[in-house]
Amino acid sequence: MALFDAPPYRGPKSDHFDGRRFFNPAPEVHHASGGDLLKWMLSRKRGPWRRVHAEPGPPPPRRVEGDALRVTLVGHATLLVQMDGLNLLTDPVWAPRVSPVGFAGPKRFRPPGVRFEDLPPIDLVLLSHNHYDHCCLPTLRRLAAAHDAPPIVTGLGNAALLEKHGIPGAVELDWWEDTRVGEARVVGVEMQHFSGRGPRDRDRTLWLGLVVEHPRAGRVLFCGDTGYGPHFERIRERVGVPRLALIPIGAYRPRWFMKWVHVDPDEAVRAHLDLGAMTSVGMHYGTFALADDGMDEPIADLETARATHAVHPDAFRLLAHGVGEDIP
Ligand code: ZN
Ligand code: ZN
């Protein structure tokens, strides 16, 4: 096992695990090769990004009550979701860079929208997969220490990596498996993506989306990273229509390379429609420059996509970083 590789999952084969690697069942999904990566690296045409020096937003409320559902965009795939008796964070990242080492790799173009010290008590962490822009070990360690080691619900195989780094509380789910956290049910759902942290651990642990079903606040879907596919309709059929879907809209150019693993804003709007989500919130843009789309391109392309599909800006909305919004 090379230095940065995550420990591999070991378990029985399934329709998306061949005994060694996980895979998406759709046969047409193209798995990028080393040659594809090289081709992209040599032909990159990056859109512009700029440093944003914004003050963090106001401290979020400690708790919300009744059927309230409040969402705050911290940045990238990190969101604070608040329901009665349940504060959760998705793919929490407060680090200045998302890479295996502290001195290189994608760095932040804006500070986190919420100060770590201003977080309300965190009862649950949703961890979609082990890529560095989603699975930040220093942040997870800090959360465990400051918030009494909240449960971390994640995909098969990720507990070993967390345990190796002294982070307790991981609960592993396969797609369509569920677990209970307090009053809520958390369900793992299929997404079209991949995993890996080092040169030789590609697809050795599971990637997934997570649905939280709360008795009063309803159903919230966190997609993590995903390409477009029939799985959005499957989630609607098997788990149900979300009150709120958190859907990625950034890191999608060039399409020939990214389309299998990252939706573009048009596909994000189609996913919102496939899911039948009452409200969707865009994420995974504006903080880390991971692909060739410029900093503002996802926002402009989302506007076009909403117009194309006649989706109201309140139905698929973007949040100001650090400013909480109550979801209808
Ligand atoms: Zn990813
Ligand atoms: Zn990502």
Image (cartoon, rainbow, N blue to C red):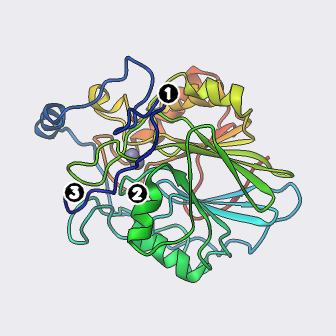
In the displayed structure image, the side of residue 141 where residue 295 appears, left or right: left
| Residue drawn at point x = 60 percent, y = 52 percent | 319
Tell me the amino acid under the disc marked 3. Answer: Met
Locate residue 114, reporting x and y percent.
56, 71
Q: CA distance from mark 1 to mark 3?
A: 36 Å
The residue identified by callout 2 is 287
Q: Which mark is residue 1?
A: 3
Q: Are marks 2 and 3 in contact (CB under 8 Å)?
A: no
Which residue shows up at 56% across the image and 27% down it?
A: 231
The residue that appears at 18% across and 31% down in the rendered structure is 36
Q: Are marks 1 and 3 in contact (CB under 8 Å)?
A: no
Q: Name the kind of residue labelled 1 in the image.
A: Glu
Earlier residue among tags 1 and 3: 3
Numbered circle sitting on residue 28? none
Q: Is residue 260 visible?
A: yes
User: Position of 199 compared to 140: left or right?
Assistant: left
Find numbered disc 2 in the image and state the secondary structure of the residue it sits on. Answer: loop
User: As rendered, which of 39 and 144 lies closer to the eye?
Assistant: 144
Nearer the N terminus, badge 2 or badge 3? 3
Q: How busy is the neighbourhood of tag 1: few (under 14 within 10 Å), some, or many (20 plus)?
A: many
**Residue 14 location in percent, x, y?**
48, 31
| Image quadrant in which the N terminus is located | bottom left
Graded by Cα atoms within 10 Å as few (under 14), some (14 to 19) or many (20 or more), the crowding at tag 2 reads many
The furthest residue to the top? 28
In-front residue for pair 105/157: 157
* Residue 276 shows up from this direction: no
Tell whether 242 sits left or right of 318. right
Please name the residue that numbered disc 1 is placed on: 267
Instruction: Give the residue furthest to the front.
Output: 12
